[in-house]
Structures are given as structure tokens and as C-alpha cells.
Image (spheres, grey):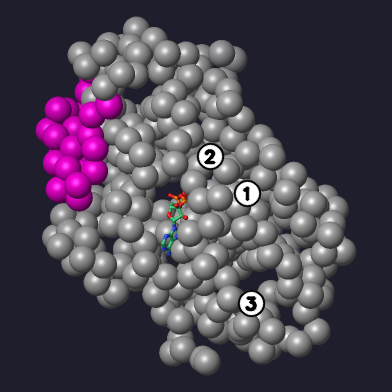
């Protein structure tokens, strides 16, 4: 099956690759197999995604290359699987497959699978290929692009990981049809983030296209994914290792990660906020902190809060999280330097900036609702 040409976004730099965005790509054996240099493939997926799409991928690969040895590892769905234990299972699966240095790991799933598979690929024999096959909107617009890989430990999210750019990203937009509405909205939080940090026109477009995007209309979604990927590609190309401007992509994330860590990495169906939702709350907290520090006006905070709210996303801290405990989590963020809080704040829509040494008492005030 050869679908009509998908949209593509190129990511340049030392390890260039292409992001393909379009329908029916998980059945496109030629496209999938084009990135397999050797004979060994491990398809890593989760318990919700594998039953829907893993056979499609395996069969497409096999149709194209009968000589391939294709293994499969399925982890339980959800953030609670992004652990050192799952990492152990992934490298064990590669060992059992007899994977050599030209092996390829296919990450079939959302950001959890993508981060875990990428990290396993980064470590197996000091680095084998990884092809990202994102099946959540969040993974299509963010986590599959840029080469950040990681697992969580109880002390914090993503604390153990590596930079390992994928060999390709293949985003089959048909897979979004099975995505629960809550997960679609979580992805839209990261899409809104691009507007908030660097693209006021896109922010306006997102206001106008709310109905189409929430209804899952293909053309609007493809446009939102492509524009988001263009932004991410432009930034990671210039700053692959997050020494500077790449940190801007973390608007709302220091607050968000603290929320996620403090509430525990529960399954997405429970009352806990998932990653995109935590980022939505985090962006509003970052905007409020920016206003408190005199960097931006309250109208900007309100515009962001209003848009997130219109997309059905949470904009306030859930009850039961202690501000002091959240601050303690924020102190462990990877962006901090020399023990000082370094946060992404903004000067209004489209104007995010990294602020070193943020006053902790102002952060605490904002966490307390002040
Ligand atoms: N590496 C990065 O740069 C980066 C960036 C942003 C987020 N992340 C990470 O990404 C993770 C969040 O990713 P996520 O929101 O995709 O979560 P996820 O991978 O847990 O997926 C969300 C849920 O949707 C299910 N699912 C996935 N695709 C589906 C489909 N097509 N149909 C039906 N169900 C489907 C999954 O099984 C899961 O239950 C976090 O761990 C976060 O830290 C990484």
C-alpha cells in the first residue's frame, strides 16, 4: 500500500532525519523498512496500542523484507511503565533477539513508549537506530522529535536518559482515530505551547480552529502537527543538546513535572493529571509568575488560560498538592544551575524566555494561588 505523499518536515543538524505526517503510514512497508539497516527489528509498544497497530507494522515490514527478524515487547500502558525495570525488559528483548549494532527499534506508541524505546536504543551496544512511530498527538508534535529519551525514577521524571535522535519519525494520522478524547486534548496542550512560546499567529489560528481540532478533523490536525513539528525542528536543529534556546520548549514543564511527580505516575484513566494536562496547568502558573515578576500583563495570562480552557484543559492546580512539596520537586529540575531555580517564563504570547535564578518566594506565592 502506498498512500499519496505525506507532509514532511526535515530536521537538520549532525543527525538529520525526516518527519512524515499523513494517513496509512503504518501500513507503508517500504517507508518503514527503508530505515532498517540490518536484520533485527524490535517493535516496542504498549498494551493499548499493540493490539491496534503492532500486527499492521509487523506485516508491512515482513511484506517488504522477508529476511527480517522482528521481535516485539509490549509494556503496560501508562507513565508508570517508563521505568528502569521496563528499560531492563527492552534491552533483554534486544539480547534475546540477538540484535547487532545495525538493529532498529521501532517505538510504536505515545511518549512513554517513545522515550523508553529511544533510551533502550541509545544504550543497546552504545547506540542502535530508533524509528519513532508516534500514535498520540502529544508524541507526534513533541516527544518523538528531537532525540530526548528517558525513564522516570521515584525521585523525578526523566532523570535517567540520553540524547539519541531518531533515524526517522513516521506519524500515521489515522492512528489518532482510536485515541481517547482526553489524550487528544493533552496533545493539544503541547500544540498550544508552540503558539505561546514563539508564534502569536498560530495561537490565533488555534483559537479559530478549536472546533475542527477537537472534532479530530484530519486537515486541521495535519496542519497543527506540521506547524508544531516545524517549530520543534527549527529549535532542536540549532540547539540539539539544550544548551540554550531549546529550554524554551519547556514552558510550563517545570511546574508540570513537579505536579506529575508529586501526584505519582498513575495510570492516565485515574484522577491524576496526565503529562499534557500537567503542562497546561504549568503554563498558566508560569504566566502568572511572569505577571507577578512584572514581565507580562495579566491579560496575557488570561488569554492563555482562556484558550486552554476552551480546549477543555485544566488551568489550576488540582486539590491536595502541597505548594512546599511542589517547590521541592522543582528544585530537582534539570534546567536548574548551581542550585538556583531556572524557569521558562514569558513576556506575553509568543515571547517566552529563560529566567535564571527565579525568586523562590514568588514561586511559592503562585503555587499558593497568590
Ligand atoms: N522526549 C521528549 O522530548 C518528550 C516531550 C514531551 C513529552 N515526553 C514524554 O511523553 C510522555 C507522555 O506521552 P503521551 O501523552 O503520548 O502518553 P502515553 O504514551 O502514556 O499515551 C497516552 C495513552 O494513550 C494510549 N494510546 C497511545 N496511542 C493510542 C492510540 N492511537 N489509540 C488509543 N490509545 C492510544 C496509550 O496506551 C496511553 O494509555 C511522558 O512520559 C513525557 O515525559 C517526552
- Position of 290 with respect to 59 (left or right) is left
Residue 84, above or below 255 = below
Q: Earlier in the sequence, mark 1 or mark 3?
A: 3
Residue beneath the point at 61% across and 83% down: 60
Examine the image and state in which quarter residue 132 appears. Answer: bottom right
Task: Give coordinates of residue 347: x percent, y percent.
Answer: 27, 32
Residue 7, above or below 357 = below
Question: Is residue 315 shown in magenta?
Answer: yes
Residue beneath the point at 59% across and 15% down: 338
Q: How many marks?
A: 3
- Position of 239 with respect to 200 (left or right) is right
Tag 1, which secondary structure?
helix
Tag 2, which secondary structure?
helix
Q: CA distance from mark 1 to mark 3?
A: 20 Å
Q: Nearer the viewer, mark 1 or mark 2?
A: 2
Whether residue 114 appears in this view of the structure is no
Residue beneath the point at 22% across and 60% down: 214
Q: Earlier in the sequence, mark 3 or mark 2?
A: 3
Numbered tag placed on residue 80 in the rendering: 2
Location of the C terminus by quadrant is: top left
Numbered tag placed on residue 116 in the rendering: 1
Q: Which stretch did the figure color magenta?
A: 291-318
Q: Residue furthest bottom?
A: 1
Q: CA distance from mark 1 to mark 2?
A: 12 Å
Count neighbours of disc 3 (C-alpha within 10 A) and say few if under 14, some if 14 to 19, many if 20 or more. Answer: many
Instruction: Identify the residue under disc 3.
Output: 58
Q: Nearer the viewer, residue 120 or 181?
A: 181
Residue beneath the point at 51% across and 51% down: 77
Whether residue 136 appears in this view of the structure is yes
Task: Give coordinates of residue 283: x percent, y percent.
Answer: 31, 35
Task: Give coordinates of residue 114: x percent, y percent.
Answer: 57, 54
Q: Nearer the viewer, mark 1 or mark 3?
A: 3
Amino acid at each position: 500500500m502506498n498512500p499519496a505523499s505525506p507532509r514532511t518536515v526535515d530536521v537538520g543538524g549532525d543527525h538529520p532525519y525526516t518527519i512524515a505526517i499523513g494517513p496509512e503510514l503504518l501500513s507503508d512497508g517500504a517507508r518503514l523498512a527503508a530505515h532498517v539497516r540490518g536484520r533485527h527489528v524490535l517493535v516496542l509498544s504498549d498494551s493499548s496500542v499493540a493490539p491496534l497497530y503492532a500486527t499492521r507494522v509487523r506485516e508491512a515490514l515482513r511484506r517488504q523484507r522477508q529476511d527480517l527478524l522482528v521481535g516485539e515487547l509490549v509494556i503496560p500502558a501508562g507513565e508508570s511503565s517508563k521505568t528502569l525495570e521496563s528499560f531492563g525488559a527492552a534491552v533483554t528483548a534486544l539480547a534475546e533477539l540477538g540484535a547487532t549494532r545495525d538493529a532498529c527499534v521501532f517505538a510504536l506508541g505515545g511518549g512513554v513508549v517513545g522515550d523508553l524505546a529511544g533510551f533502550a536504543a541509545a544504550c543497546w551496544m552504545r547506540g542502535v537506530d530508533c524509528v519513532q512511530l508516534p500514535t498520540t498527538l502529544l508524541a507526534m508534535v513533541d516527544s518523538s522529535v528531537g532525540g530526548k529519551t528517558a525513564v522516570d525514577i521515584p525521585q523525578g521524571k526523566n532523570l535517567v536518559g540520553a540524547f539519541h535522535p531518531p533515524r526517522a519519525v513516521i506519524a500515521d494520522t489515522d492512528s489518532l482515530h482510536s485515541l481517547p478524547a482526553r489524550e487528544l486534548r493533552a496533545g493539544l496542550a503541547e500544540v498550544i505551547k508552540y503558539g505561546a512560546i514563539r508564534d502569536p499567529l498560530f495561537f490565533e489560528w488555534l483559537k479559530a480552529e478549536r472546533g475542527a481540532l477537537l472534532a479530530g478533523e484530519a486537515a486541521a490536525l495535519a496542519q497543527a502537527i506540521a506547524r508544531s513539528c516545524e517549530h520543534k525542528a527549527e529549535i532542536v536543529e540549532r540547539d540539539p543538546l539544550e544548551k540554550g534556546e531549546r529550554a524554551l520548549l519547556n514552558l510550563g514543564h517545570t511546574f508540570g513535572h513537579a505536579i506529575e511527580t508529586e501526584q505519582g505516575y498513575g495510570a492516565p484513566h485515574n484522577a491524576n493529571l496526565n503529562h499534557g494536562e500537567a503542562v497546561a496547568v504549568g503554563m498558566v502558573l508560569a504566566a502568572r509568575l511572569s505577571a507577578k515578576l512584572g514581565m507580562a500583563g495579566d491579560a496575557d495570562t488570561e488569554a492563555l488560560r482562556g484558550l486552554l480552557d476552551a480546549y477543555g484543559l485544566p488551568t489550576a492546580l488540582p486539590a491536595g498538592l502541597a505548594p512546599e512539596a511542589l517547590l521541592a520537586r522543582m528544585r530537582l529540575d534539570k534546567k536548574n544551575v548551581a542550585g538556583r531555580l531556572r524557569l521558562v517564563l514569558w513576556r506575553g504570547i509568543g515571547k517566552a524566555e529563560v529566567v535564571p535564578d527565579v525568586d523562590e518566594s514568588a514561586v511559592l506565592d503562585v503555587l499558593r494561588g497568590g
